[in-house]
């Protein structure tokens, strides 16, 4: 029933993440949030919580499960976030690294006194091979790491945090791995249920910068002109790029040049230098544009204009 | 005559972009789909159960 609800929210584009863990081998300290809300005692599976235990449920609910869990989610959706989080996670080998910027908007200072904690959860969309022996929901937590908020973070203050998982050997398909970062704390202080202030997707995003250089400038007619293209991966995932350089007229060769580099993250760069020859007798501007597109969605444009000053026409022509 | 002046003005404006020699533009791509999450609460529903 949880998987059906998850699919409904996903189809509606609602900001809800459904996660599953093996109760016998829980990762990190997430299950501790459930017990903090429930307290000691005997319980039945499944254990379900929203927003770090702000609401919990336990036991098989049968036909009422869908509506019960939906009501829990809807109540949380109606609450405003009490923190702002900027987070990005990216893969380093078989680990996940997270950079997090947290702004506390809770109205109270966040600290170890109220167990304020930044969590990063890695989960995989994994279709069960056999529902009788595999997980149920298809959204399986693969890692859960956390770091306490210390020293205290005052209301309105911002701080950055860095988290990193251990080597992950339980991932089936890295292409289906997703991440979230969340912040929770104990409103009552050092005991009682936790509450989540905010969560965000930390999925890596594609981003790039394009730099185009033309030397020398100005360039003389009949002389070589050297172009350098530099594309930098400033996002969190490898980029499979197509670089198209449209050469200006009045140079040889002319036309469109194309390359298809893979530029790795984080921080990978691709640089290419080539030489053209300016047409004899041509002294005008040479406009060269390079366009970068990627399978991941990031795009960029770089333009180099040579001899631009030589054809600049001042506005005094109006006289 | 006016048409010629307008053409000069337009050409001047266009070429002014190229006033700096070998002008290079930098452009970063907008990360798609990540702009709105921080604006509203992202709800996490976590389930602990036994497979199967």
Image: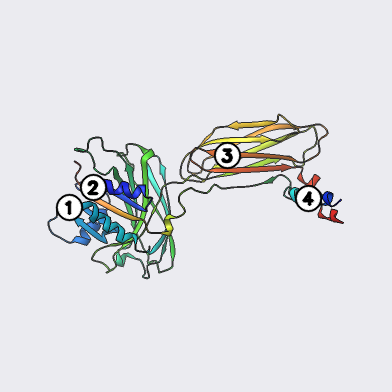
| Residue holding disc 3 | A292
Label 1: how many Cα within 10 Å (few below 14, some 14–19, many 20+): some
- Per the image, label 4 sits on a secondary structure element best described as helix
Q: Contact, CB < 8 Å: mark 2 with mark 1? A: yes
Tag 4 residue: B12
- Same subunit, tags 2 and 4: no
Residue B26 percent location from the top left of the image: 61, 47
Mark 1 or mark 3: which is in front?
A: 1
- Residue B50 rendering spot, x and y as whole percentages: 19, 45
- Discs 4 and 3 lie in a common subunit: no
Task: Specify whether residue A164 is in view.
Answer: no
Residue at the image position 49 percent from the left and 37 percent from the top? A295
* Residue most extreme to the top: A253
Q: Which quarter of the image is occupied by the C terminus of chain A?
A: bottom right
Q: Which residue is mark 2?
A: A1
Place of residue A103 in the rendered image (x, y in percent of width and height, measured from the top left): 42, 63
Please name which of the two marks, 2 or 3, marks the residue nearer to the observer: 2
């Amino acid at each position: 029933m949880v998987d059906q609800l998850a699919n409904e929210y996903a189809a509606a584009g609602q900001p809800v993440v459904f996660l599953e863990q093996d109760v016998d081998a829980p990762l990190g300290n997430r299950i501790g949030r459930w017990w903090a809300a429930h307290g000691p005692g005997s319980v039945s599976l499944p254990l379900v919580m929203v927003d770090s235990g702000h609401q919990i449920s336990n036991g098989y609910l049968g036909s009422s499960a869908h509506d019960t869990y939906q009501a829990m989610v809807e109540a949380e959706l109606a609450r405003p976030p009490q923190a702002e989080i900027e987070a990005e996670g990216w893969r380093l080998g078989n680990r996940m690294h997270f950079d997090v910027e947290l702004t506390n908007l809770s109205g109270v200072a966040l600290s170890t006194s109220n167990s304020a904690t930044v969590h990063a959860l890695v989960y995989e969309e994994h279709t069960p091979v056999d529902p009788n022996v595999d997980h149920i929901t298809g959204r399986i937590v693969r890692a859960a790491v956390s770091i306490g908020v210390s020293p205290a973070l005052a209301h309105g203050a911002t701080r950055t945090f860095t988290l990193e998982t251990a080597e992950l050997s339980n991932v089936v398909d890295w292409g289906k791995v997703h991440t979230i970062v969340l912040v929770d704390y104990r409103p009552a202080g050092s005991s009682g249920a936790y509450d989540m202030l905010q969560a965000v997707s930390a999925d890596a995003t594609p981003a790039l910068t394009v730099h185009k250089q033309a030397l020398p400038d100005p360039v003389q007619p009949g002389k070589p002109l050297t172009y350098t293209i530099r594309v930098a991966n400033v996002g969190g995932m490898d980029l499979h790029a197509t670089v198209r350089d449209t050469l200006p007229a009045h140079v040889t060769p002319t036309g469109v040049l194309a390359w298809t580099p893979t530029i790795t993250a984080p921080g990978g760069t691709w640089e290419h230098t080539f030489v053209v020859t300016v047409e004899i007798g041509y002294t005008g501007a040479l406009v060269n544009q390079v366009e970068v597109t990627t399978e991941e969605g990031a795009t960029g444009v770089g333009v180099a204009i040579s001899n631009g000053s030589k054809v600049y026409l001042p506005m005094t022509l109006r006289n | 005559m006016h048409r010629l002046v307008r053409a000069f003005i337009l050409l001047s404006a266009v070429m002014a972009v190229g006033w700096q020699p070998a002008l290079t533009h930098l452009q970063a791509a907008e990360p798609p789909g990540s702009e709105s999450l921080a604006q509203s609460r992202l709800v996490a529903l976590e389930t602990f159960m036994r497979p199967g």
